[in-house]
Image (spheres, grey):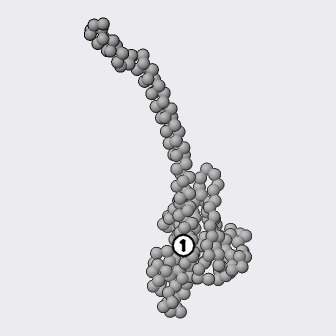
Amino acid sequence: MSSKNINRTANSQSGFSLVELLIGMVIVLIILGFVASMINGIQREFNRQLPRMEALNNAEMTIDTIVRNVRMAGAQSPSCTAAFSITPLTPSASAGGGVYNALRVQADWNPPDCSLGGVDENVTFSVKNGIFYIDAAQAEPFTEGIAAIRFKFYDETNTLLTDAVANAVKIKYVEIEIDIRDDTLTTLRSGVQVRSR
């Protein structure tokens, strides 16, 4: 065999033929199409679930804020004079059956300076048009995506106070329910013991 034939045989066996390249490209394109379809589906589902996730996060933040404040209700420095008076919990907006849609909380804790001028020392929790407020005038939105908020109040024997306004001094435990705005009715529940009682 001559060296000319050896070189031609080696050259003809190296590389891919045009048909093999086309088949490889078609397989790669099919795989890429499948992957792109999966990614597109995942992205669509994420975009569909995003408002629900945001509403859940807002509801959890709302509950945490309420729990923190109710836990501190009525707290005040021992150095305050008798003239400095706090009304720890004031339920309002009765929905009947011991359920209330608004709650005012007072505490001198941030900082404890015998006044209610600090952050979160005199707040009113309520919902209007899907927005959660912590100010009585409902002028400054806190979170959105909240459809409704409900409070139930219990005394030290875990008895529901059906008239919590008249029995505000007996409130020992507050149950909180928050409905979020999403395509299904989702309710988050929590409860908090009032420390100062």
Q: Would you name the residue on which mark 1 appears?
A: 68
Residue 35 vertical position relative to residue 173 in the rendered view, above or below: above
Residue 163 vertical position relative to residue 55 in the rendered view, above or below: below
Residue 22 vertical position relative to residue 107 in the rendered view, above or below: above
- Identified at 51% across, 62% down, the residue is 143
State the residue lying farthest toward the left: 3
Circle 1 crowding by C-alpha within 10 Å: few under 14, some 14–19, many from 20: few
- Identified at 56% across, 61% down, the residue is 59
Instruction: Please name whichever residue, 163 or 192, is drawn nearer the observer in this view of the structure.
Output: 192
Q: Quadrant of the N terminus?
A: top left
The answer to whether residue 40 is left or right of residue 158 is left
State how many labels appear.
1
State the residue lying farthest toward the top: 1
For the residue marked with disc 1, what is the amino acid? Arg
Q: Quadrant of residue 22?
A: top left
- Identified at 65% across, 79% down, the residue is 171
The location of residue 141, given as percent across then percent down, is 50, 64
Q: Quadrant of the C terminus?
A: bottom right
The answer to whether residue 167 is left or right of residue 106 is right
Label 1 residue SS: helix
Residue 88 seen anywhere in this rendered image of the structure:
no
- Identified at 57% across, 71% down, the residue is 67
State the residue lying farthest toward the bottom: 82
Residue 177 seen anywhere in this rendered image of the structure:
yes
The location of residue 193, given as percent across then percent down, is 62, 76
Instruction: Please name whichever residue, 14 or 114, is drawn nearer the observer in this view of the structure.
Output: 14
The location of residue 147, given as percent across then percent down, is 60, 59
Instruction: Please name whichever residue, 175 or 94, is drawn nearer the observer in this view of the structure.
Output: 175
